Image (cartoon, grey):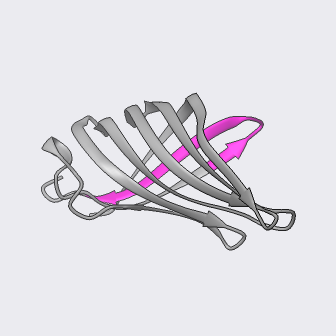
Amino acid sequence: MTRTAVAAFELDKWEPQAQDEAGGTAFAQVLIEKTFTGAVEGTSRVEMLTASNETSRAYVAFERFTGSVDGRKGSFVLRHTAGDEGLSLVLLPGSGTDELAGISGSADIAVDEGKHTFTLVYELPGA
């Protein structure tokens, strides 16, 4: 059965680690930490790589979430890809632990007037 869990999140840390620019395109590595409240409750750590120039921006990232989803405790990893074509957030198969073992699905992030909303659409065996 497919379920949906919605949460707000705050960016606790945005820390560039390394930067490089050549040929008009800049690369950056960024460490991000977040706190989630709502049906998704907990914290995450994101390791992001970005590329940007005058006409385009894109990033790839992995995010390890630890906490609970609809009251079930554990962790999982999200794979981010984003660019001019849009944003994709997919749960990494096999990354769920504890009560979130076997979780699969995808997510979306919306920003409205500086507030971040995280929507997780997932399936969980036995839930």
Name the dominant secondary structure of the magenta segment: strand
Furthest residue toward right? 54
* Residue 15 picture location, percent across and down: 59, 33
Which residues, given as a range, are shown in magenta? 110-123
Q: Residue at position x 58%, y 50% from top?
A: 109
| Residue 85 shown left or right of residue 102 in the figure | right
* Residue 66 picture location, percent across and down: 31, 36
Q: Which quadrant holds the N terminus?
A: bottom left
**Viewer-nearest residue: 111 or 94:** 94
Is residue 16 positioned above or below 63 on the image? above
Please tell me whether residue 124 belongs to the stretch shown in magenta: no
**Viewer-nearest residue: 44 or 22:** 22
Please tell me whether residue 120 belongs to the stretch shown in magenta: yes
* Residue 127 picture location, percent across and down: 18, 52
Furthest residue toward bottom? 85
* Residue 111 picture location, percent across and down: 69, 44
**Viewer-nearest residue: 107 or 76:** 76
Q: Residue at position x 85%, y 68% from top?
A: 55
**How many marks do you count on the picture?**
0
Q: Quadrant of residue 103?
A: bottom left
Q: Quadrant of residue 102?
A: bottom left
Q: Residue at position x 16%, y 52% from top?
A: 101
Is residue 46 positioned above or below 49 on the image? above
| Residue 8 shown left or right of residue 45 in the figure | right
| Residue 17 shown left or right of residue 57 in the figure | left
Q: Residue at position x 38%, y 31% from top?
A: 41
